[in-house]
Image (tube, rainbow, N blue to C red):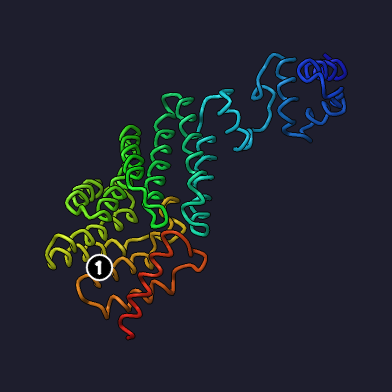
Amino acid sequence: MGRDELAAEVVAWVAAREPFRGPHPFDANHLGKLERGTVRRPGALIRAALCAALGTDEAGLGFSPPPESERLARTLSDQVATDVTALSATADVLARVRRLEDVTGPGDVLPIVHAQRGVATRLAQNARADVRPAAVGLISELEQYLGWLHMAPTVERWKESRQHLDRAVASALESHDYMRLSTALSFAADRYLRIGAPDAAAALNDAASRDQRVHVAQRTFNAFQKAHILVNSGSGRDVARALIEADNLTEQLPPVEELPPSGYWYTPWFFHGERAFVLDSLGDHREASRLAGEALTALPEEWVNGEWTQRRNNLEKLVERTHR
């Protein structure tokens, strides 16, 4: 076919499917731009028409790969199988929602995260065997985040939190994702600690801490969590040993930019605050106050709502207690 004939077929194909829009302006001139590479990727309608007219697919026509957002839309419409591009687009949204939560608080992002969990579930259903573990792993992260959000002081829906964390653990096991498994178990331990069940918290913390392949930031969190749990049920010597382990891990923390996207707050100043809370429980109020002051100084000002409000208030109380 010549350019004019092919362009006419494209226009006819579009007209047959969208009869109410009027004649499409696609012509031989537009086709020439595609052939020269001036336009690398026309709109979805034109791409579909060209594929139909030439009996091939987009790869055969040499079109550039679809943007992530479009790839995600096509995957959710079951036009293509789930791939890493679609999963990456969903994970990027989750990372931005976490940052949004720092500013708005948990209640405002809960509907968004529930919607993202639905998206991730559809992606997993549309994933082939080689991609499914990554898709199920993303479900685990979303369930873990929902479990965490339901524990926030402004929400405190403990039953829903347990349900989400149970699903996070199950999905992490299915996907063989040791990092997400450790995170889900650790958050479940935190839940039991908050509701006054230290024995259950200790068992879950032990399970979360077993795999040494877990990122050092999460292992550091687990070590400080162990110290918190021992404050409630162990001896002072046990707590001291846990703090030594946690401090040693803190020294191994990478730069902030190398932290996992889901644990971007696991910085030295965050763990300074964790140590301050443990020392205050042990009666070392002066050192707890000093560490709390350092943690407050480093806490980003924009992190003001939700979990961070409670944390900031608790750190301020430690500082004020020594100054009185």
Left or right? Give the position of 14 relative to 273: right
Q: Which residue is at a point 22% across and 57% down the rendered structure image?
A: 226
Q: Position of residue 235 (x, y in %)?
A: 11, 65
Instruction: Identify residue for label 1.
Output: 278
Q: 212 and 74: which one is in front? A: 74
Q: Residues within 10 Å of mark 1 (few under 14, many from 20)?
A: many
241 up-or-down from 196: above or below? below
Q: Position of residue 209 (x, y in %)?
A: 24, 50
Q: Amino acid at mark 1?
A: Val
Dividing the image into 4 quarters, which one contains the C terminus? Answer: bottom left
319 up-or-down from 299: above or below? below
Residue at the extreme bottom: 324
82 up-or-down from 178: above or below? above
Left or right? Give the position of 52 relative to 119: right
Q: Which residue is at a point 40% across and 33% down the rendered structure image?
A: 136
Q: Position of residue 148 (x, y in %)?
A: 38, 50
Q: 73 and 108: which one is in front? A: 108
